[in-house]
Image (spheres, grey):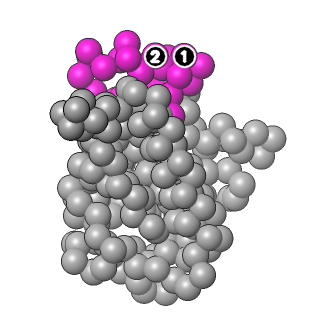
Amino acid sequence: MKNEMTMVETDIWHPAQQQKLFRSLLDAYSYPGRIQSCAAESSLSLLSALLDGQTTLSDPQDLLPESIWPKLEAQRVPYELAAFILLDGSRAPQMVPNLGTLEAPEHGATLLLRVASLHEDSAGTLRLQLSGPGIRQPVTISVDGLHADWIKARNDWVANFPIGVELLLCDTQRFVALPRTTRIVIGGEA
């Protein structure tokens, strides 16, 4: 019985697991900077909870195994058209995602950036000070394996709010949401 329960808890394709993860996503967006946990590999788990046959996904760096695409059911599109984009956060950005428009800001992409590790303190190599809606007092998180140019580019992309992008930073079993309304300062400097 214990083995069956463990399998169900970590089966990212199981509806109960996806509902639990979706609730964690809602919490992550409500409280930016709070690191959330996943029972399985976080970027794939998040994709399993977010995608369906009507959503679009781009994997320009071929991070997903080909065998996963049928399970995700998402439409594979170029990054310029994608609602969700999976990327290696350690590589500098080499593209501009869909930012939405003033008439349809909800079309801005959500970028899932794989990173080495997330920390709720200053243990990582890149410190990010966060403030804005959902954050009572400025919060600092730190990240290993995230190229600083992602934050610089993201800050440029959200400068003309409401257009912009959402970021989900994902290590192996944790993630953090950084909505376009969150102000991010690298290193905690003003």
Taking depth in this image into account, of 116 and 62 the one nearest to the observer is 116
64 shown above or below 35: above
Tell me the quadrant of the picture where the N terminus can be found.
top left
Q: Is residue 106 left or right of residue 35?
A: right
86 shown above or below 190: above
Numbered disc total: 2
Residue 37, x across and y down, in percent: 35, 55
| Residue that label 2 marks | 73
What distance separates the C-alpha of mark 1 from that of mark 2?
5 Å
70 shown above or below 6: above
Which residue is at 53% across, 48% downward?
A: 23
Mark 2: few/some/many CA within 10 Å (<14, 14-19, 20+): some
Three-letter amino acid code at disc 2? Glu
Mark 1: few/some/many CA within 10 Å (<14, 14-19, 20+): few
Residue 20, x across and y down, in percent: 47, 44
Which residue is at 32% across, 38% downward?
A: 9
Which residue is at 51% across, 58% downward?
A: 28
State if disc 2 and disc 1 touch (CB < 8 Å): yes
> Mark 2: which secondary structure?
loop
Q: In the rendered image, is residue 94 in sight?
A: no
> Mark 1: which secondary structure?
loop
Q: Residue 70 in magenta? A: yes
| Residue that label 1 marks | 53
Magenta stretch in the rendered image: 50-78
Which residue is at 46% across, 68% downward?
A: 33
Q: Earlier in the sequence, mark 1 or mark 2?
A: 1
Q: Which mark is residue 18?
A: none
Q: Quadrant of residue 29?
A: bottom right
7 shown above or below 143: above
Q: Residue 52 in magenta? A: yes
Three-letter amino acid code at disc 1? Gly
